[in-house]
Each structure stands twice: as C-alpha cells, then as structure tokens.
Image (cartoon, grey):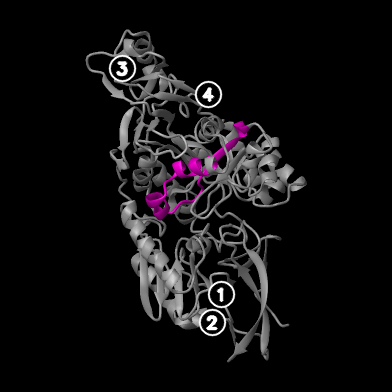
Amino acid sequence: MPDPFPSWPDVAPLLIAVAAGRAPADRVIRGGKLINVQTREILDGWQVAIAKGRFAYVGPDASHCIGAGTDVIEAEGRYLIPGLCDAHMHIESGMLTPAEFARAVIPHGTTTMFVDPHEIANVLGLDGVRLMHDEALMQAVSIFVQMPSCAPSAPGLETTGREITAEDVSEAMSWPGIVGLGEMMNFPGVIAGDPKMLAEIAATQEARKTVGGHYASPDLGPPFHAYAAGGPADDHEGTTEADAIARMRQGMRAMLRLGSAWYDVERQITAVTEKGLDPRNMVLCTDDCFAKTLVEDGHMNRVVRHAIACGCDPLVALQMATINTATHFGLERELGSIAPGRRADLILTSDLTALPIEEVFARGERVAKDGDCLADCPHLDWPDHARQTVKLGKVLTADDFDIPAPDGANRVRAKVIGVVENQAPTKALTADLAVEGGKVVPEGEICRIALVERHRATGGVVNGFVSGFEYQGKMAIASTVAHDSHHMIIVGTDTAMMAQAANRLGEVGGGVSVWKDGTEAALVELPVAGLMSDSPAEDVAKKVDRMIAAMTDCGCTLNNAFMQHSLLALVVIPELRISDLGLVDVTRFELTDLLETP
C-alpha cells in the first residue's frame, strides 16, 4: 500500500511559490506565539502558511501568502507547538486497532507515532505486521512502523504463533511505512554475535533505517558496550539516571517512557535537569498505554506534562517529544518542527505547562478541537484468520491446573514469580508450600499462575506460582494479552475458575476474563489476534474499567495490575517468567525447575 501523503519533491514548487507570495496558501495561522524547537525560542507574533499539507512559510508576517480562498485562523495569543511524536510504542497495548488508537490520541495532540507491532507479529507473523502497516498508512496522522525483530523474543525459551526471520526483515524494509527495526529484545543474542540477529540489524542498516534497542539489564559493563557496538540506536529500558547517561554517552538515544505502568521519566531526566547534560539525545515515549489511560489521562501530552513536572524546562520537554524524535529516525526534514517543508502538524495551546490541547492540525488539516476528534480514521477489513487465533485444542478442566508434588513429599520449596509494582522486572522468590493429596497448595497471598498454549491447539498447560497481586477468595483472571508470545496467561486461586476463564476466552476469540466466586465478573473482548478491538476507545475503556474493578474486588490493589499480569511471560526481562516451555530464569536465560524438596 503506497503512502498517500505527497512527498516534498511533489509539492516543492508550490511551497516555494507560496513562501514567495506568488501563490496563495491553503491556510494561514496568525496572532500566536510560535515555539521554535530548532532554536528553543518563543517567537511572539510569528505566523505560518500551509499548502498541500506542509508548512510553506514560517515567519513574522504571512500576509503575502493570503489569497481569496485562504483559510485564516486567529490563534488569539495562544502558542503554536509542533505536533507531538511518540518515539516508541505498541498500538496493541491499547487493546485497539491502529484506526481506533489514532482516533483516541489525535485529540491529545499526537500527530506522529513510531510503532513496533511485535505483539501481533508473535501471533500472525509478517502477515500481521502487514495488516498493521496497511491500516496505519490509512490514517490522517503519521504512523510509522518498525519491523519487529524478535519473534520469538528468546529462541529456545518460548514458542510463538509465528516466527520473524531475517528474510522477513529484509522484505519489510522496502515497504513505504517501515522506518526501521523494532526493539532488539534478544540482547544476549546480539552480545554473543548471533548470526540471525546481526543479519536483521545489517538488513536495516543497509536500508539506511534505524535499529531499535532493548537492553533490559542493569549491567553497564562489557555486555552493555557489546550491545551498543552491535548497532541498536536507542533504548527505552533504562530506569535510572546512570542508565540514561550510559546510553547517551554511547551515542544512543535514551528513550524515557511514561506509559500506563512505566514511570521511568522522573529517575532519568535528572541527567538533563540536574547534571546539565545535552538533551539532544533524550526522547520521550509511552511504550505501552491502555485505552483507559488514553481516554482519561492523555497520551504524549501526558508525558510532556510529566516531564515538566519533574523539573524539565517546557521547551526542552517539547524538543524531547518532537524534533529529537524526528532527528533520531532521520525525519527531521519531514516532521517534528514548525518549519518550511515539514508536514504541517501543530497544536494550539494556551499554556505551555498545563498543556491543554485546544486545536490539533495534522498535514495541514484540523483533526481535533476541544477534545473532539474531527478526523476520519478508516478501518482495514481484518480477515477471518486474524480474528480466529485462540486455539486451545481441548476443553480445559480444573485438573489441568493442578501441580503434582514429588512422591512422598509433605512440603516442597517452590520458585515464585514476584511482581514488582510499576516495573517490568520481576523478582525470583522461593516459598515453602504444603502438599495435600499429592498436590502442591499455594499459601498466603501466593497464587497459581498458568500459561495455556493457544496458537497451535496443543492443549499444553504450564503451571507455577506468583506473588504480589494479593488476590483473596476464589477467583481467576485469564488473558490472551501475554507479552510477548501471547499465549494465554491465567492467575487464580481456584483451579475450576481458571478453567472457566480459559474456556471463555476460547469462545470469544481472546481478550480478558475475570471470574469471582464462580461467576464471570468482567469481560474485555479482543477479537483481532486476541489482542485488539476495533470498537472505539471509549467503549473498550468502559470494559477495562469493569475489569479493573473486578480485579480490585478480588483483593488486588496494585497500580495497573493488568499490565503486570500481561508481562508475566515476558522472557527477556529478569528475573523469573513463565513460558509454554516451562519456568524461565531470565538472569541466566535458561529453563529452571519449579519445585525442589526442602
């Protein structure tokens, strides 16, 4: 599918003519204060003239660009700021298709997104990436796609629905909306010189595109330097000031994320606000945002406001969400600033700190006003094979979730996945548990966790233990959103309800099902790849509200507990995870036994 937006060479003669006063602009905005992120200035009274979706003139007086048919907009003293860019994110985490995600974020001032659809890649492979790419190109805002690099994210430790190969990466680099390689999560592979990983990086660099990074380790010694030498140009897994500094010193962009569950800006932005380092290599992103967050709190506007609240100069924070991002992806001549030739993406706001998003323009057209999306967000016709992806292979029963004890054992020592609130890493814990009737029984706030294979109908179930959710009574929650392989993850205290929750998702084609005291308390249907809904964000957010309320009724008080739930199978982030192959020790990148006799 070709990119429908005209390129600069196609419109350059007109832009020149408008700027010179020989042709009228389509639209002129005047009477405001222009934020120039190129120079970090506020230019009072500067005006912009727009033609064919691009800025033609940016200067003190655009009166010579006005003709009989020019739409003149009075900014009335408000600030003109560039449209906001999300440097790294996964649309699927919003539980929305690209069209509905765009509809949700446009009123918040997001006009450019760099998306890595590795969630759907794990389910549908290259075909799923193509579907996301094609719907992304249909939107009124700019959605660039990074070709997923790691499906599976950790070969030998999990089985995905489909695999991404180096040949797939090479093919995708020729697609019009592909801007680079998605986060290289297999950092041990890069460090070890894995030929497949290096071939993907080479194919991207040969196409002169950007390699995304993902170094999920606190070790900033030789392994980190080896990873940086492998070619990744950015990283969003940092959580400390030292992490941000280390990445920037190596010529990487430090991506600071504020998502629905990630709060990594405050601890890293001090590299700029307190240490005084050059902010050019620091960018802002969301990584993962729920529909509920988008509807209630915002998107990149929320991130920029947060950065400002953490002590960042508003103009620097805006640079981190506009020109820095565009420059990182080699698109600084295309977007990220209010300057001639760039896509005419801008926001009108009356306050640089509170950042109310009052009007949004994308490619020169008004796409939102006062919180209402005015843009058309067309849908792709998602095929049946993308909607029929939950294949359990059998009807599950309570017995599938029993954990047999070693013969003759009265108690056992078990490894337990420890959830850490608001953070991606888990803790590798142990607990001494009782044995009843030859089966291990969780005690206290320790719950059961199970991974149910859902791609190939094998009927496989892997069981384990998890702590940190503090569920009480008889309950279960099942989800086909289970990063990154997206099998089905179930956490519960009652094996019968765990089976009911799993079978329910098999019936509806995926999503999230919460059960309490034998009854389904909440259901979020996600029929597209078991990951997304093509319903409006507001409708999905209401169902997510009921899901969260149901989880709270079951005793859970964690902030964004569902995000923690969905990451329990993420076998590239330490310390302990679960996969379809067993329990995974991510500090050693190897499978490990669940039980041992104390």
Numbered disc in front, either 1 or 3 = 3
Instruction: Tell us which disc is closer to us: 3 or 2.
Output: 3
Which quadrant holds residue 20? top left
Q: Which residue is mark 4?
A: 38
Q: For mark 2, what is the residue?
A: 402
Residues under numbered marks 4 and 1 in contact, where contact means CB atoms less than 8 Å apart: no
Magenta run includes residue 300: yes
The kind of residue tagged 2 is Asp
In this rendered view, identify the residue nearer to me: 33 or 333: 33
Q: CA distance from mark 2 to mark 1?
A: 8 Å
The reply to whether the magenta stretch includes residue 193 is no
Q: Position of residue 86 (x, y in %)?
A: 48, 40
Kindly state the secondary structure of the residue where label 4 is placed.
loop
Q: Residue at x 31, y 39 (%)?
A: 370
Residue stretch rendered in magenta on the structure: 279-307
Viewer-proximal residue, 157 or 324? 324
- Badge 1 local density, few (<14 within 10 Å), some, or many (20+)? many
The residue positioned 67% from the left and 37% from the top of the image is 248
Query: Where residue 223 sits in the image (x, y, percent)?
Result: 74, 47
Looking at marks 3 and 2 on the same chain, the residue that comes earlier in the sequence is marked by: 3
Q: Amino acid at mark 4?
A: Gln
Residue at the spot of label 1: 463
